[in-house]
Amino acid sequence: MSNPVIVDVIRTASGKGKPGGALSGIHPVELLATTIRGLLQRNDLDPDLVEDVIAGCVSQSGEQAANIARNAVLAAGLPEAVPATTVDRQCGSSQQAAHFAAQGVIAGAYDVVIACGVESMSRVPMFSNFAGKDPYEPLGSRYPDGLVPQGVSAELIAARWKLDRTALDEFAAESHRRAADATTSGAFSAEILPIGDHAVDETIRASTTVDGLAGLKPSFQDPALAERFPEITWSITPGNSSPLTDGASAALIMSEQRAHALGLTPRARFAAFAVTGSDPLLMLTGVIPATRKLLDRSGLALDDIDAYEVNEAFAPVPLVWQQEFNADPARLNPRGGAIALGHPLGASGTRLLTTLVNQLEASGGRYGLQTMCEGGGMANAMIIERLG
């Protein structure tokens, strides 16, 4: 089997996912195309060598429809012979793209492949691909009481694991503090591809405090749901949730043999993968069984892992994960997470991977773990090992 390695990873700085955001004037095809071009240029790689491009994107409608991966490849100027496909595993879409790319290398299907992702939430709003229809209606016979929005799932998780509003807001404030410190220290400079003059994450609020967050109103409070779920205390707010975000990210993945033949130095290798389904009502808890499955497969214990990236879709997700595994909070999202850095849905998987690789290099850590909760009750998880 070929050994899949990460040669390089980059991301754009986040842009607020609303009109007037730093990246809102850029068509999502061009945003992804610019990121792919930047990745190839940074490594002086002949684009003819790329055998496939796999991109994550969640809202595949409007400007993100018609296989945005292929459109971005063509817009980036890559040869017409380079194919591309777009995948949707909800928030984990580009992490799944990285899994597919690495697994393709292991299978011998690829030697050089790009895994990437994009989401322009300012131009293609979340749920716009529903077109006013209810995609969950056929599930009524199995779930007669109905499923709930992700924010309500986050509320249910907070209630079940007894996480109060203060704990959620403290975690959110710390995410902003860590991200602001990483920005000030220049820690993000190696991972961010400037888009024009935009090179700093627009979603970080360095002035965030617990007291300030305490004044925000719950986002998902609903009388009918309150009757159905009396245990909910309604603690999820815009402040302890990830913001709507624009962004793109990309990873250059190769067989180790091809990387060395091209004179490129691999930065990390893929050590283990896992993907699992979970309760679609508590849809954000999949990170727990996915991590257990991953650790079992890898033969590693959590204490062997030097950094954990657990996507901060909502504050309860990483907090519950930390609680379940008794994880070291200092190793959990050490540069801040999506609450501060943003969550551009389809781009978040390779965004987390970019940050994880750079964190391991900066800290001298060996192993990094990444996991993403996903809509519908799923999760991806993987372990990478720093090389060099």
Image (cartoon, helix red, strand yellow):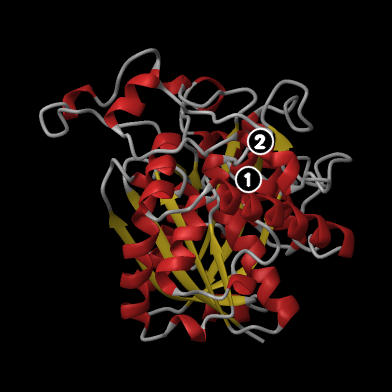
- Please name whichever residue, 129 or 255, is drawn nearer the observer in this view of the structure: 129
Q: Dividing the image into 4 quarters, which one contains the N terminus?
A: bottom left
**Quadrant of residue 148 within the rendered picture:** top left
Which residue is located at x 47 percent, y 44 percent? 91
| Left/right of residue 305 with respect to residue 321 in the rendered view | right
Number of marks in the image? 2
Residue at image location 45% in from the left, 38% down from the top: 233
> Is 178 left, or right, of 103 in this rendering?
right
Residue 78, label in figure: 1
Residues 239 and 18: in front is 239
Judge whether 111 appears above or below 233 on screen.
below
Residue 16 x, y percent position in the rendering = 71, 33
Across and down, in percent, residue 373 comes to 42, 51
Residue under the image location 40 percent in, 68 percent down: 324
| SS at circle 2 | strand
Write down the residue under mark 2.
246
Label 2 neighbourhood size at 10 Å, few (<14), some (14-19), many (20+)?
many
Q: Does 153 sit above or below residue 216?
A: below
Q: In this view, does 226 lie to the left or right of 136?
A: right
Label 1 crowding class (10 Å Cα cut-off): few <14, some 14-19, many 20+? some
> Can the viewer see residue 138 in this picture?
yes
User: What amino acid does circle 2 point to?
Assistant: Asp
For marks 2 and 1 on the same chain, the one whose residue lies earlier in the sequence: 1
Residue closer to the observer: 213 or 366: 213
